[in-house]
Image: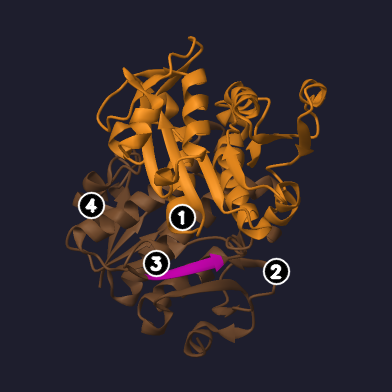
Chain colours: A brown, B orange
């Protein structure tokens, strides 16, 4: 599948592109105009430019011809310059609208654990939770996209184990490698469409967790 | 009618309380715990405390027994401390959820001109437009409230004229006094329910503009 990765130079985005390629998919690395795409091109991976501050129609032109989108962009907690509102919320929603314009129906979103439960929002991350909450909500209620929302716990740089859990009440962390592996597996698991899935490190192989959804 | 004014000490909120009282309604001045309510109490106006950073259930307890809510709170452009996200967006939506919990069906929202049209968002105000867009959208699509959304142009301190216009393509300003007068009149005009109304200074008496809706 031709999969557009929004935020391909991000910490999770890089892993998504690499793992998609390794699995035999055809990733497209979505980067801002000011980001370096040479590494990707050296590996034979297509680079396309997109600006999440632009209009949906503009973003749509970058998405044309793709079969799926993985949204892995994030303001990186830069709330002081309004990027939480403009990227994590409105940039995400504009990408959904762009997907509809471009006719790309499959949309995989990286959200945050408990984004839908205001009672569990930890204080320093509250603005990011607000942004993720309204972005996820839009995807579920105001699009006709075939979505999968993955809500990982705290992201770590530990090496992946390939083993996760999806207990809706658990708290914890997950290596970015395992998040990326789960996203790539979810892309090819039709039972994830229309689902919001919490994700943490665990003891169950990813394929088994997906099989039980 | 017993009307809860959220943000009663704000520049528009003050005018709402005063004009509601003058018209014979029964305004309730909604203030934060740290705001001075003595002026209102001296005028025989009920003061209730509410915290837009609290949970909807908590906000609901302040709204009990009211017939309508006017949302006039705002972060005042303090985007640097995340208040655009936490007050203008999530605080507004929590107030809507609180209204539903408290059984207050009528909800009048002060939004911004062109909040629903991303192509017309002026750059310095973009974060506030994002917040207003998603708050208005929630009110329309994700509540069963009898809403009226008023979208004024730039607010001025000029004295009110009682004359306005509601041309969806016009650009301009409006005195806060006229905005408040329109809100109070809209409260008693059932044809405003379920409508989003742009509002600018004009040449037509408020009652005539409302009659044509």
Q: Earlier in the sequence, mark 3 or mark 4?
A: 4
Q: Is residue B60 left or right of residue A99?
A: right
Q: Name the residue at the top extreme.
A: B158
Which of the two residues, B86 or B102, is positioned nearer the viewer here? B102
Q: Is residue A7 left or right of residue B69?
A: left
Residue segment shown in magenta: A147-151
Circles 4 and 2 on the same subunit: yes
The structure residue drawn at horizontal position 46% and vertical position 73%, both measured from the top left corner, is A181
Which element type, helix, strand or loop, lies under badge 1?
helix
On the image, numbered disc 2 is attached to which residue? A171
Using the numbered discs, state the Cα–Cα distance from disc 4 to disc 2 in whole angstroms. Answer: 36 Å
Is B199 above or below relative to A20?
A: above
On the image, numbered disc 1 is attached to which residue? A135
Q: Position of residue A114 (x, y in %)?
A: 62, 64
Using the numbered discs, state the Cα–Cα distance from disc 2 to disc 1 in whole angstroms. Answer: 22 Å
Q: Position of residue B35 (x, y in %)?
A: 77, 27
Is B167 above or below relative to A35?
A: above
Q: What chain does badge 3 belong to? A: A
Circles 3 and 4 on the same subunit: yes
Which element type, helix, strand or loop, lies under badge 4?
helix
Residue A32's quadrant in the figure? Answer: top left
Using the numbered discs, state the Cα–Cα distance from disc 3 to disc 4 in whole angstroms. Answer: 16 Å
On the image, numbered disc 3 is attached to which residue? A108
Q: Earlier in the sequence, mark 1 or mark 3?
A: 3
Which of the two residues, B193 or A97, is positioned nearer the viewer here? B193
Q: Are marks 1 and 3 in contact (CB under 8 Å)?
A: no
Q: Position of residue A183 (x, y in %)?
A: 44, 71
Q: Are marks 2 and 3 in contact (CB under 8 Å)?
A: no
On the image, numbered disc 4 is attached to which residue? A60
Q: Position of residue B119 (x, y in %)?
A: 28, 36
Report the mark closest to the observer, 1 or 4: 1
The structure residue drawn at horizontal position 47% and vertical position 37%, both measured from the top left corner, is B186
């Amino acid at each position: 599948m031709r999969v557009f990765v929004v935020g391909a130079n991000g910490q999770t985005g890089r892993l998504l592109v690499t793992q998609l390629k390794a699995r035999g998919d055809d990733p497209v690395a979505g980067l801002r105009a000011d980001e370096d795409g040479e590494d990707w091109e050296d590996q034979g991976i297509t680079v396309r430019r997109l600006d999440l501050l632009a209009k949906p129609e503009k973003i749509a032109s970058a998405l044309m011809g793709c079969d799926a989108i993985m949204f892995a962009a994030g303001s990186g907690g830069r709330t002081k310059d309004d990027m939480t509102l403009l990227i994590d919320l409105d940039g995400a929603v504009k990408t959904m609208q762009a997907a509809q314009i471009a006719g790309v129906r499959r949309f995989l979103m990286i959200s945050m654990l408990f984004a839908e439960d205001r009672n569990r929002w930890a204080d320093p991350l509250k603005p990011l939770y607000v942004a993720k909450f309204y972005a996820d909500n839009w995807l579920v209620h105001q699009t006709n996209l075939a979505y999968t929302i993955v809500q990982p716990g705290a992201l770590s740089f530990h090496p992946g184990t390939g083993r996760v859990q999806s207990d809706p009440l658990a708290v914890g962390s997950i290596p970015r490698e395992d998040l990326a592996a789960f996203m790539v597996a979810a892309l090819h698991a039709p039972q994830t469409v229309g689902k919001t899935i919490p994700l943490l490190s665990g003891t169950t192989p990813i394929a088994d967790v997906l099989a039980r959804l």
